[in-house]
């Protein structure tokens, strides 16, 4: 059994049918990249895995535990961390206080992260630990959001476009951190627009098109399918 399983998942926003019967599995400690064009449903699928979008049919299970219908807080406690596209920080709290807000016992068996490890990943956050988060740059806020989710000690981390709008040097750092998270045994589902990064970090790649999974395989498999890339990924 995979750690996280999505089965026959359909979702609607009002009358719009957005996800059309998604089946996917996230194995323990795997980094999975979820690719697709704008509007293909990638963020909606992450939200579904976090219980933020209810199914009109289908299920999501974490280690066999049905999470649909549960509160996001309980889903988080069971071991799913979520880094949304919009950087969710508390602007009036300092960096250190934001990190403290993220600390949770986490799921049994999950790697236990410390604030010191977060500062090792992103020394810039350490330098700015007494600053209110609202004064951080976009890149720093992104780092803070990732760290806060990690401090919840998740078994699966869902990350939505973490490198968007970041300077190339910081993109490299974020990529290394994601690889390291994987090495510590945490599974990652990564939505990433930059194809080179998505392929470099992933063990498995899934491509979404119009709310369906249209390809799954290894990064090498995808490299051999120029037709898939042309049709579902590259901007014409
Ligand atoms: N809250 C919402 N209400 C209504 N429609 C929505 C809502 N959020 C997203 N959608 C629509 O659902 C579809 C899928 O959106 P989603 O955000 O999942 O796409 P995406 O692949 O993450 O792309 P991007 O991040 O580039 O927007 C789009 O057509 C979008 O317009
Ligand atoms: Mg999105």
Image (tube, grey):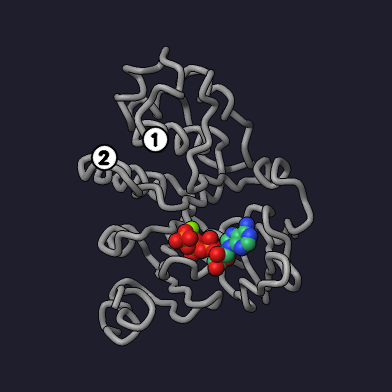
Relative to 146, is 233 on the left or the right?
A: left
The mark that comes first in sequence, 1 or 2, is: 1
Residue at far bottom of view: 227
Please name whichever residue, 53 or 197, is drawn nearer the observer in this view of the structure.
53
- Specify the quarter for ligand 1: bottom right
Measured as percent of width and height from the top left, residue 176 is found at: 29, 45
Measured as percent of width and height from the top left, residue 234 is found at: 30, 74
Q: Residue at x 68, y 65 (%)?
A: 13
Q: Secondary structure at mark 1?
A: helix
Task: Read off the residue under disc 2.
Answer: 170
Whether 91 is drawn above or below 47: the answer is above
Residues marked 1 and 2 touching at CB (< 8 Å): yes
Q: Secondary structure at mark 2?
A: helix
Whether 195 is drawn above or below 47: the answer is below
Q: CA distance from mark 1 to mark 2?
A: 9 Å
Task: Read off the residue under disc 1.
Answer: 143
Q: Residue at x 62, y 68 (%)?
A: 1
Give the quadrant of residue 220: bottom left
Q: Residue at x 40, y 17 (%)?
A: 129
Mark 2 within 8 Å of ligand 2, using the beta carbon: no
Please name whichever residue, 2 or 83, is drawn nearer the observer in this view of the structure.
83
Measured as percent of width and height from the top left, residue 215 is found at: 44, 80
């Amino acid at each position: 059994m995979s750690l996280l399983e999505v089965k026959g998942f359909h979702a609607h926003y009002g009358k719009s049918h957005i996800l059309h019967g998604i089946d996917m599995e996230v194995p323990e400690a795997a980094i999975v990249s979820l690719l697709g064009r704008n509007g293909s449903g990638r963020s909606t699928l992450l939200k579904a895995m976090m219980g933020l979008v209810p199914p009109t049919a289908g299920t999501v299970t974490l280690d066999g535990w049905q999470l649909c219908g549960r509160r996001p807080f309980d889903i988080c406690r069971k071991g799913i961390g979520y880094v949304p596209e919009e950087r969710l920080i508390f602007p009036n709290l300092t960096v250190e206080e934001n990190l403290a807000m993220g600390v949770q016992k986490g799921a049994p068996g999950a790697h236990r992260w410390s604030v010191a490890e977060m500062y090792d990943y992103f020394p810039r956050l350490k330098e700015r630990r007494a600053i209110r988060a609202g004064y951080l740059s976009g890149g720093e806020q992104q780092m803070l959001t990732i760290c806060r989710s990690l401090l919840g000690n998740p078994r699966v981390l869902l990350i939505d476009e973490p490198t968007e709008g970041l300077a190339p040097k910081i993109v490299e750092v974020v990529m290394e951190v994601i690889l390291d998270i994987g090495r510590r045994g945490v599974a990652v589902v990564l939505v990433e627009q930059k194809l080179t990064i998505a392929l470099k970090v992933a063990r498995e790649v899934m491509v979404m098109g119009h709310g369906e999974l249209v390809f799954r395989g290894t990064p090498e498999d995808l490299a051999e399918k120029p037709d898939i890339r042309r049709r579902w990924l590259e901007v014409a």
